[in-house]
Amino acid sequence: MIKVNLLAGAPGATAAREWLPREQRSAVLGVSLLLVTAVTLGGWWWYLSYTRASLDERIVAAETEIVRLKEAARLLEQTNARRTLLAERLGLIERLRASKRAPVSLLETVSRSVPEGMWLLELKQTGQSVQVEGRALSLTSVTDFALRMQNSGLFEHPVEILTTMTEQVDQTTVVRFSIRAEASQPRTTVPTALSATSAPGAPAGRSGV
């Protein structure tokens, strides 16, 4: 039996063409690698540019926030300074009011403490020290006056009787006295002097300051 190979090319037939010649494959591969590298580098550059722009925006926002916080801190500092100044002024006003009320309170307290049969001649205040001089018909009135001043709450204990001496006023024997007391609360020094000398022969009644 004879077999004939009909697929075999006839003598002199040309070989099939290759799509990419072997000598160009290396060049095409190199170009492909260059394109892939260029695309990769382009993507990386775009990512870096995007990241840089995002960071720049965040930096600008942070700087704006810093400026705002600095302004808020400055306003807060000014507010605290004004509050401190206002507190100092209010304290000064209160101290001035207290210093103005102190002599009035002192005179009222001493006046309320004067018993019957006594009249005052002089009252002096230097700092917290108060000295009172006057006349009384009896030594009992003097001790009663010192006790009332001591119990008034305005003076420290004890209220001290410095001197007592008898003298004649229009043929009447009276007791000349001097009393010293210390104010119980600190005050602004307001020297106070009050003199009220009774005329000889004044009635032996209560006399205010």
Image (cartoon, helix red, strand yellow):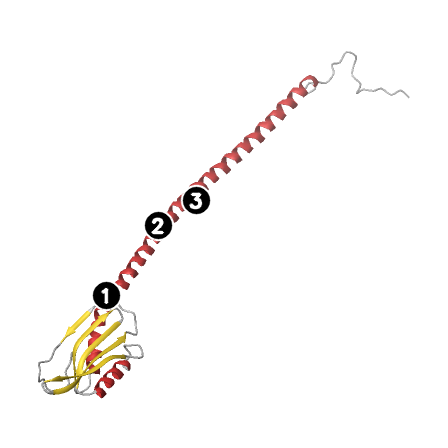
Dividing the picture into quarters, in which one does residue 62 lie?
top left
The residue drawn where x is 38% and y is 47% is: 70
The residue drawn where x is 19% and y is 70% is: 192
> Looking at the image, which residue sits at the far right?
1
Sequence order check, earlier mark of 3 and 2: 3
Three-letter code, disc 3: Ala
Task: Measuring from the top left, give residue 24's x and y in whole percent.
Answer: 67, 18
Three-letter code, disc 2: Arg
Q: Which residue is mark 3?
A: 62
Task: Measuring from the top left, give residue 59's x and y in whole percent.
Answer: 45, 41
> Looking at the image, which residue sits at the far top?
12
Sequence order check, earlier mark of 1 and 3: 3
Dot 3, how many residues are within 10 Å of its Cα: few (below 14), some (14-19), or many (20+)?
few
Quadrant the N terminus occupies: top right
Q: Mark 2 and mark 3 in contact (Cβ < 8 Å)?
A: no
Task: Measuring from the top left, give residue 182's x and y in whole percent.
Answer: 28, 74
Front position in the image: 57 or 77: 77
Sequence order check, earlier mark of 2 and 1: 2
Q: Mark 1 and mark 2 in contact (Cβ < 8 Å)?
A: no
Dividing the picture into quarters, in which one does residue 176 lie?
bottom left
Q: Is residue 177 above or below residue 1?
A: below
Q: Is residue 187 above or below residue 169?
A: above
The residue mark sitting in front, 2 or 1, is 1
Q: Which residue is mark 2?
A: 74
Q: Which residue is mark 1?
A: 96
Task: Measuring from the top left, give residue 25's x and y in whole percent.
Answer: 68, 21
Three-letter code, disc 1: Leu
Q: Which element carries disc 3, helix, strand or loop?
A: helix
Q: Which element carries disc 1, helix, strand or loop?
A: helix
Look at the image and tell me whether residue 163 can be seen. yes
Q: Would residue 24 appear left or right of 66 to someone viewing this image?
A: right
Q: Which mark is residue 118?
A: none
